[in-house]
Amino acid sequence: MMMSLGMFVFSLSTLAYQELQRQTDWRHPTTNRVGANPARQFVGKGEDTITMPGILLPELAGSAMSLDALRTMADTGKAYPLVEGTGRILGVWVIESISETRTLFFRDGAARRIEFSITLKRIDDSRVDMLGNILSTGLNILRRLF
């Protein structure tokens, strides 16, 4: 297991990312002043974003259905805990976007190579109402896929 987002497990048999990029922002707005440089004030933490690009080769490892499962999770609008394979908890995240590019096709139109990128945004605050019931969401995903 490389990482899990809710009940979805990133691994070689599902969806393996090649990179994990994380960007964290802090907010320092400015106020213009006469005869002096603008004043800056720290007002708190900004966005926290993770981007995971990768390549899926369905013939060798992984499944295109994994991207469908993540899209179904994103359709709920819920947030999910993100946990590294080491056990490190990264917080609660929503799926902001998924992009894919399919190339090298079989005769039936199935792609041999799928490049993807998944963008997650952290939403940790006291908004427990956005945290999806992991069990019911997992069952809903399975129902839609099968």
Image: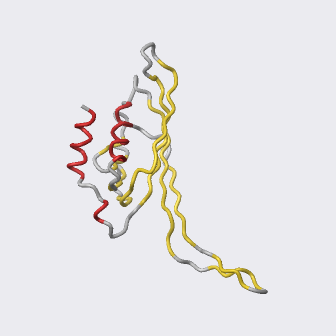
Report the front residue among 56 and 135. 135
- Which is more toward the observer, 56 or 18? 56
The percent position of residue 83, horizontal first and vertical second, equals 34, 54
Name the colouring of the figure: secondary structure
Q: Residue at x 39, y 37 (%)?
A: 67
Number of on-image labels? 0
- The residue at the point 33 percent across, 46 percent down is 73
- Residue 21 horizontal side relative to residue 91, left or right: right
Quick check: 52 above or below 37? above
Q: In this orientation, which residue lies closer to the viewer: 145 or 23?
A: 145
Q: Quadrant of residue 58?
A: top left
- Which x, y percent locates residue 115? 50, 34
Q: Residue 63 in the image: state x and y as whole percent.
A: 36, 30
The residue drawn where x is 36% and y is 42% is: 70
- Eyeballing the image, is 73 above or below 65? below
- Left or right: 134 as drawn, with respect to 74: left
Say if 121 sits above or below 145 in the image: below
Q: Residue furthest bottom?
A: 35
Q: Quadrant of the C terminus?
A: top left
Snapshot quadrant of residue 14: top left
Q: How far across and down, in percent of the image, does residue 33 sit? A: 72, 84
Residue at the extreme top of the image, as rendered: 107
Front-most of residues 77 and 9: 77
Which residue lies at the image location 38% right of the left edge and 59% below the top edge?
A: 90
Q: In the drawing, does residue 95 fall left or right of residue 31?
A: left
Quadrant assignment for the N terminus: top left
